[in-house]
Amino acid sequence: MTVLEQRGAYRPSPPPAWQPRMDPAPLLPDAEPYRVLGTEAAGKADPGLLRRLYAQLVRGRRYNTQATALTKQGRLAVYPSSTGQEACEVAAALALEERDWLFPSYRDTLAVVARGVDPAEALTLLRGDWHSGYDPYAHRVAPLSTPLATQLPHAVGLAHAARLKGDDVVTLAMVGDGGTSEGDFHEALNFAAVWQAPVVFLVQNNGFAISVPLAKQTAAPSLAHKAVGYGMPGRLVDGNDAVAVHEVLSDAVRHARAGGGPTLVEAVTYRIDAHTNADDATRYREDAEVAAWRAHDPVQLLERELTTRGLLDEAGIEAARQDAETMAAELRDRMNQDPELDPMDLFDHVYAETTAQLREQRALLRAELEAEQEQHGEQEGGAR
Amino acid sequence: MTTVAVKPATMAQALTRAMRDAMAADPTVHVMGEDVGTLGGVFRVTDGLAKEFGEDRCTDTPLAEAGILGTAVGMAMYGLRPVVEMQFDAFAYPAFEQLISHVSRMRNRTRGRMPLPITVRVPYGGGIGGVEHHSDSSEAYYMATPGLHVVTPATVADAYGLLRQAIASDDPVVFLEPKRLYWSKDTWNPEQPTDVEPIGRAVVRRPGSTATLITYGPSLPVCLEAAEAARAEGWDLEVVDLRSLVPFDDETVCAAVRRTGRAVVVHESTGFGGPGGEIAARITERCFHHLEAPVLRVAGFDIPYPPPMLERHHLPGVDRILDAVARLQWEAEG
């Protein structure tokens, strides 16, 4: 018998009553991803929206194939294709108002372009002529983020700052399934929920983080379930159903704008191409799996809906294809021109005011360039 | 005639005053971090700010350094000037990725379109009897990252002046606060407080002719004490306070070394891979023909920061500095 078990021994008082702050049930995602296309709900979708989504999907698919072709020609160092994920990209851009901000990851070029950024400028990071070719303030699109999930706290901070200023600005932060394992993902969701920041987190669950499948990434029931632990709603949506993704994201954006706080949306999709052109996807997945997802293609799904409802005919399909071809041809022409680079740019944007040390290094490079030019001139002169 | 109060103030008070004045002058200045609000910071450096400016301007954040700095990035993107507190030197390490991958590079990445005016306050260094992870000198990590300014005050006046400049800077500034000097006092005039040299300029705190001690932050008082003690040996030591590690003031440092021909760099951080190696190399490259002896370093040992009961053996003290100066003399004669 221990001392505490003895008759008349000290007994601790029961702890004060404690209850969880809220019922987690309303925050839980549905068991199945939300779908619109192929269901009765599709009949209620606005035809104008369907057409806009379709045009952007077709352009997006063509952009992906064109950019992939440019890697083969050595015009792009690398391109992480989003073929198969176009619905997420397009819906992301179309769910936002002009004053809202988009925080993309490196695979989200399509969302960036759909937001209005020049298609060629969106590729400078991947071409290698500069890290970010576009002005983030021009279309309210943050630079493509290469480290995983680190852009998510930025989205929270910007949304928080806007709210402090009294602006009804919403931010949409995009991340992949692998990125949800990073600490910054956790910290961003936690800050957003505590601050009730007007942010929407969109996880594109495309099945793999390079080669690692979702089952090895997380033991959570779904990525959308992670929301509950932070105190925000989680939504699960078919990422290949452009109309469903647009609806869920638009709901989340409205909710955030109205002061309801953040939402975590998981879009279940699939990366049809390899991680990048440097990756061999046959080493970690079966052809049958890819084929099954090809049959659930986001462009085809929407095209079928539109044609079934009589909103699109062969001529319309051809027109969308032509528009995408024109975009691809322009992109090809521009990317085939050698970018004009000024090496002196290297020193211009390190600090607001160049330091004495950088001025010295600038002078060194200037002298090297002049010597190079002089030598070049002499050689040309000698040849004459 | 009005009399201006010139009375003793601590470095911590000057830092608080700097944030208060910056917040009063500019509504975009926001202070954020763990415990900075209601508690006023574990060192009370943010004391009273939440009360005066509200919790939206001085915010207790969740306990997450990457999140604190990461959200500050987004706030700066939207036009605010966040002043972030990283409670203790070694607690800042989770925020390194944000600092190095984003804070330091955003201006460069966007070709000047998206500058990030963030001040990251880091109480650093030893000498206060802190347990493990509470006494690191992390300045070399920050110095190695282009795009960051790295600043560390050693006087009460500089604490105020440099922090005001850091907050006003359009670039990110890592503001290293020597925590063992938080309670050091100086006569200081809070009514005319900004009269200090700008970030990037070193200052000769004590002129001398025998040798130049080059130091910063927590080691400045130690060097000044060593200079006083050196008079007994007949040595007249010059003491240079760097104040800013990035940008580095080659001009002031080299002028001082050329005057004396001898230099010792003094800091708490490790010698191997520490700031002293860079400083010694810069001096040697620029002043070789003026040197009477090799540039020496008196630094912390190349060990993880020791437990508090042993830290006095690790930290550069007066005797170790004077021994180095003696070696400089020997080098000159030998």
Image (cartoon, rainbow, N blue to C red):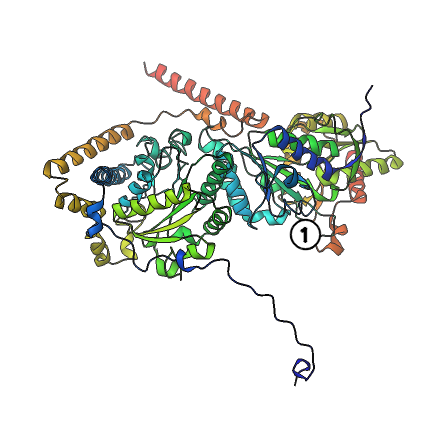
On screen, residue A130 above or below A156: above
Secondary structure at badge 1 equals loop
Asked whether residue B334 appears in the rendered view, the answer is no
On screen, residue B233 above or below A28: above
Residue at (60, 66) in percent of width and height: A16
On screen, residue B117 above or below A207: above
Front-most of residues B80 and B143: B80
In the image: residue B216, left or right of residue A383: right
Res. B211 image quadrant: top right
Give x and y (percent) for residue A226.
42, 56
Front-most of residues A293 and B52: B52
Front-most of residues A356 and A21: A21
Q: Amino acid at mark 1?
A: Tyr
Residue at (72, 30) in percent of width and height: B291
Res. B248 image quadrant: top right
**Which residue is denoted by mark 1 in the rendering?**
B305
Asked whether residue A32 appears in the rendered view, the answer is yes
The chain holding disc 1 is B
Give x and y (percent) for residue A349.
49, 28
Residue situated furthest right in the rendering: B232
Tag 1: Cα neighbours inside 10 Å, few (<14), some, or many (≥20)? many
In the image: residue A111, left or right of residue A226: left
Q: Quadrant of the C terminus of chain A?
A: top left
Residue at (78, 34) in percent of width and height: B332
Give x and y (percent) for residue A338.
31, 27
